[in-house]
Image (spheres, rainbow, N blue to C red):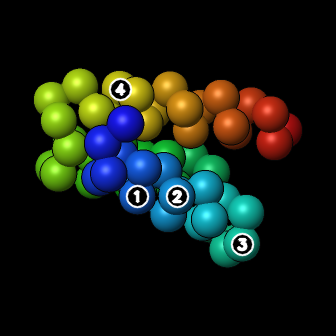
Amino acid sequence: MAKVDRSILFLSVNEMENLDIPISVSINEAVNIAKEYSTSDGYKFINSVLGKIAEKRK
């Protein structure tokens, strides 16, 4: 896993758990950041992981 992807996931999961930011907003921002700074398919990976985490939290 790329360091950028790991960092994006870390920040997004912390937003979901510790801040009053809606889950969908956190995932959307993480995907947008990944599109800018990660590999060409990194955003797909991040979207998938965060989607699974969001499902488990419900």
Quarter of the image for the C terminus: give it.
top right
* Label 3 or label 1, whichever comes before in sequence order: 1
Q: Nearer the viewer, residue 8 or 3?
A: 3
Nearer to the camera, 7 or 20: 7
The residue that label 4 is drawn on is: 44
Q: Alpha-carbon distance for marks 1 and 2?
A: 5 Å
Q: Is residue 30 above or below residue 40?
A: below
Res. 10 visible in picture: yes
- Is 18 above or below relative to 10? below
| Residue position marked by numbered label 3 in the rendering | 18
- In percent of width and height, residue 19 lies at 67, 74
Residue drawn at (50%, 26%) of the image: 48
Question: Mark 2 against mark 3, which lies toward the viewer?
Answer: 2
Mark drawn on residue 7: 1
x, y (%) of residue 17?
73, 63
Q: Quadrant of residue 50?
A: top right
Q: Residue at x 61, y 56 (%)?
A: 13
Residue 10 image label: 2
Which quadrant does the N terminus fall into?
top left
